[in-house]
Image (cartoon, rainbow, N blue to C red):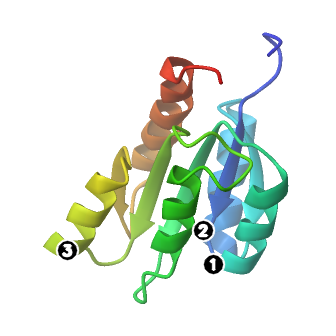
Amino acid sequence: MRHDTLPGLLLLEPYFVLRHTVAAVARELRIADIVEATSLESATQMLEHRSFDACLVSVGDERQELALIQRLRDGVLACRPETPVAVTAATVDAGLVLALKEMHVSRIVLKPFKVKVMLETLTKIVADRSSVPVA
């Protein structure tokens, strides 16, 4: 990777304003090159065909997004199984925390969140990619 190239980060967030705000700030501060996914289906298609340096996944009440994270960890997507992943969620219980821990999710951010918290999360997961061994 060239020094002037930003790391690629997939952002799965269904809400436009939230998704757009996070992406715009991350791009402006040159934290990452954000690729926005509006739905689980679009994120899945992107991850099947393109590798990303990190992923930020919004987990909904139905928790269907956990299957996508597990597929990434199982190595069936274009990303390396060790790709850093963080999640956002409106509600979290012990079962979700345990599932995310087992899938080696590095951070959980509760919604609503402050932009500062999200920027810290993005910075951390992008930095975590440098500790992931290259396949």
SS category of the residue bearing label 1: loop
Residue denoted by label 3: 95
Asked if residue 134 is positioned above or below residue 107 in the image, the reply reads above
Query: Left or right of 120: which side holds 98?
Result: left
At 55% from the left and 27% from the top, the residue drawn is: 129
Identity, as a three-letter code, of the amino acid under mark 2: Leu
Looking at the rendered structure, the secondary structure element under dot 3 is: helix
In the displayed structure, 97 sits above or below 131; it is below
- Label 2 vs label 3, nearer the camera: 3
Judging by the rendered image, the residue that carries numbered circle 2 is 18
Asked whether disc 2 touches disc 3, contact meaning CB atoms under 8 Å apart, the reply is no
Sequence-wise, the earlier of marks 1 and 3 is: 1
Residue at 66% from the left image edge and 72% from the top image edge: 17
- Foreground of the two, 89 or 67: 67
* Res. 39 visible in picture: no
Q: Which is in the foreground here, disc 1 or disc 3?
A: 3
On residue 15, the disc is 1
The x and y percentages for residue 70 are 48, 62
The spot of residue 67 in percent (x, y) is: 51, 72
Classify residue 135 by image quadrant: top right
- At horizontal 29% and vertical 65% (from top left) the residue drawn is 99
Q: Is residue 96 above or below residue 27?
A: below
Helix, strand or loop for disc 2: helix
Q: Amino acid at mark 1?
A: Tyr
The residue carrying pointer 2 sits among few (fewer than 14), some (14 to 19) or many (20 or more) residues within 10 Å by Cα, namely few
Q: Does the CB distance between marks 2 and 1 fall below 8 Å?
A: yes
Is residue 52 placed above or below 30 in the rendered structure?
A: below
Badge 3 amino acid? Gly
Earlier sequence position, callout 2 versus callout 3: 2
- Quote the CA–CA distance across marks 2 and 1: 6 Å
